[in-house]
């Protein structure tokens, strides 16, 4: 093979394995070899047989240097970052070597929420009111103006990491202390009350060729406390839901997406005026990709690869039944001694796919972000409420056994199953 692509791949707990395999298979089917850039010191069985390089992926200079070494040895045509934090370094590497794709300027529109929201406002799209946390006084004044709760989040974060819902002055004081000298890494937003949606899209030459609307079953910021998931919305869309789809195209085009994949989030408040949350220039995380594959027949990452490499390709997706997905999570912690298997989950009525990332011997700890989970499952049904009922059946059936907090013995419990897949 004389043609090559580069995939920047973090083999963390299986979150991106299906995306990685689909890109590799798609490229191979087109006669294109895959080169993999992995984290320093990490290996990935799914990358065996491929050209592999390593770098500290959290060090942008190291990534750019590694890509320089790679392109000197391989004719790289495209770069595919699967993880949110790799989008901007990948864009910088593209510019370094004249590789087509998302530019650094466009990548900033997707990574920096200050830039992202300002651009959305320029496009005439409503966003949450916000302020910079320059001083505790500025944040207090903002919170009193918009009303508690407010949300404090990193301007370039993901998966709700270091993100806080602040319900009053006492909580604000605690969060302010936690931010410390890093306050300028954060932004403060008003809390939007309403139904939360996400849209997973594919673009080609600036036009949307695929868009799947889905509705969260819970509040994203409460991933530690309540089971939840996401359910596709294909039939009988409300006017507000159609408006979300329409604005999704406006926002992604305005942020500079030409050919690629994106995951965007929106709120639909009771007043019906859609609010844009944020967007990432990569496939939805966690189980969103397998859920869409089960429901629509395409793998978003693989389809992204095909759109980049084959100018004549046209995306074709089936409509299919409504599908939903949840993460598998636990509210108990310790050493796992037994856990329900994917095969057992697939025996439950309506479950069409599942994966469990944890196994006996692993340790469960409190989640630090919304994607700190045990695995996921996908089920199908007739509508939103039907799938929510199926979610409960799976949660009730999913079992984990861990060592007890006290010395000796084990404690069996029904783990909660919930979560989401973005940020």
Image (cartoon, helix red, strand yellow):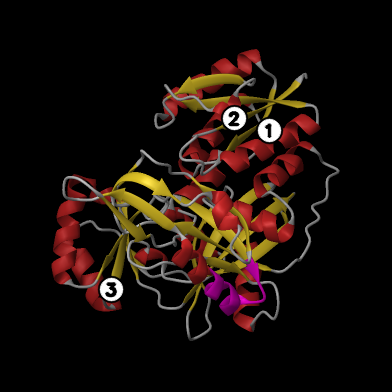
Closer to the observer: label 1 or label 2?
A: 2
Q: Which residue is mark 1?
A: 24
Question: Is the magenta region chiefly helix, strand or loop?
Answer: helix
The secondary element bearing badge 1 is classed as helix
In the rendered image, is residue 23 in sight? Answer: yes
Instruction: Between residue 301 and residue 323, name the one nearer to us.
Output: 323
* Residue 179's disc number: none
- State whether residue 111 is above or below residue 65: below
Check if residue 135 falls in the magenta segment.
no
The residue to which callout 2 is attached is 46
Q: Are marks 2 and 3 in contact (CB under 8 Å)?
A: no
Confirm or deny contact between disc 1 and disc 2 (CB under 8 A): yes
Element type where label 2 sits in the image? helix
Q: Residue at x 60, y 56 (%)?
A: 346
Placement of 68 over or under 277, stated as above or below: above
Furthest-bottom residue in this view: 271
Res 131 → quadrant: bottom left
Numbered disc 3: secondary structure: loop
Name the residue located 36 percent from the left edge and 40 percent from the top edge.
362
Q: What's drawn in magenta, residue-wise?
A: 380-390
Query: From the viewer's perspective, is 99 left or right of 224?
Result: right
Q: Disc 1 and disc 3: Cα gap in Å? A: 44 Å
Disc 3 target residue: 149
Point 13% across, 68% down: residue: 170
| Residue 136: x %, y % from top left | 16, 61
Q: Residues within 10 Å of mark 2 (few under 14, many from 20)?
A: few
Percent from the top left, x then y, of residue 173? Answer: 14, 62
Residue 44 in the image, given as x and y percentages of width and height? 53, 28
């Amino acid at each position: 093979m004389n043609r090559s692509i580069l995939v920047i791949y973090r083999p963390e707990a299986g979150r991106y394995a299906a995306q990685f395999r689909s890109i590799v298979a798609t490229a191979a089917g087109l006669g294109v070899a895959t080169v993999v850039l992995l984290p320093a010191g990490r290996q990935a069985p799914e990358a065996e047989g491929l050209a592999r390089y390593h770098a500290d992926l959290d060090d942008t200079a190291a990534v750019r240097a590694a890509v320089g070494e790679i392109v000197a040895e391989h004719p790289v045509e495209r770069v595919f970052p699967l993880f949110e934090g790799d989008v901007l370094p990948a864009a910088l590497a593209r510019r370094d070597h004249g590789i087509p794709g998302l530019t650094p300027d466009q990548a900033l529109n997707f990574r920096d929420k200050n830039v992202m929201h300002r651009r959305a406002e320029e496009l005439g799209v409503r966003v949450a009111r916000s302020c910079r946390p320059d001083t505790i006084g500025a944040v207090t004044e903002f919170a009193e103006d918009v009303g508690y709760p407010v949300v404090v989040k990193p301007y370039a974060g993901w998966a709700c990491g270091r993100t806080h819902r602040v319900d009053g002055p006492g909580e604000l004081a605690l969060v302010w202390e936690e931010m410390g000298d890093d306050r300028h890494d954060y932004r403060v937003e008003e809390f939007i009350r309403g139904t939360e949606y996400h849209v997973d899209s594919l673009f080609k030459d600036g036009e949307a060729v695929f868009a799947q609307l889905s509705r969260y079953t819970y509040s994203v910021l409460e991933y530690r406390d309540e089971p939840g998931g996401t359910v596709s919305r294909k039939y009988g869309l409300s006017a507000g839901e159609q408006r979300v789809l329409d604005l999704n195209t406006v926002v992604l085009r305005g942020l500079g997406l030409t050919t690629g994949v994106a995951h965007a989030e929106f709120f639909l408040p009771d007043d019906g005026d859609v609010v844009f949350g944020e967007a990432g220039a990569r496939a939805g995380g966690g189980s969103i990709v397998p859920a869409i594959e089960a429901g629509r027949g395409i793998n978003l990452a693989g389809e992204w690869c095909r759109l980049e490499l084959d100018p004549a390709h046209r995306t074709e997706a089936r409509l299919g039944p409504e599908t939903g997905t949840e993460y598998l999570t636990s509210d108990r912690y310790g050493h796992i001694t037994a856990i329900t298997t994917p095969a057992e989950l697939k025996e439950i009525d309506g479950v069409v796919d599942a994966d469990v990332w944890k196994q006996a011997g692993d340790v469960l700890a409190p989640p630090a972000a919304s994607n700190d989970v045990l695995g996921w499952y996908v089920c199908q049904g007739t509508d939103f409420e039907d799938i929510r009922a199926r979610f409960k059946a799976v949660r009730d059936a999913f079992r984990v056994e861990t060592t007890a907090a006290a010395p000796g013995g084990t404690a069996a419990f029904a783990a909660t199953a919930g979560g989401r897949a973005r940020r």
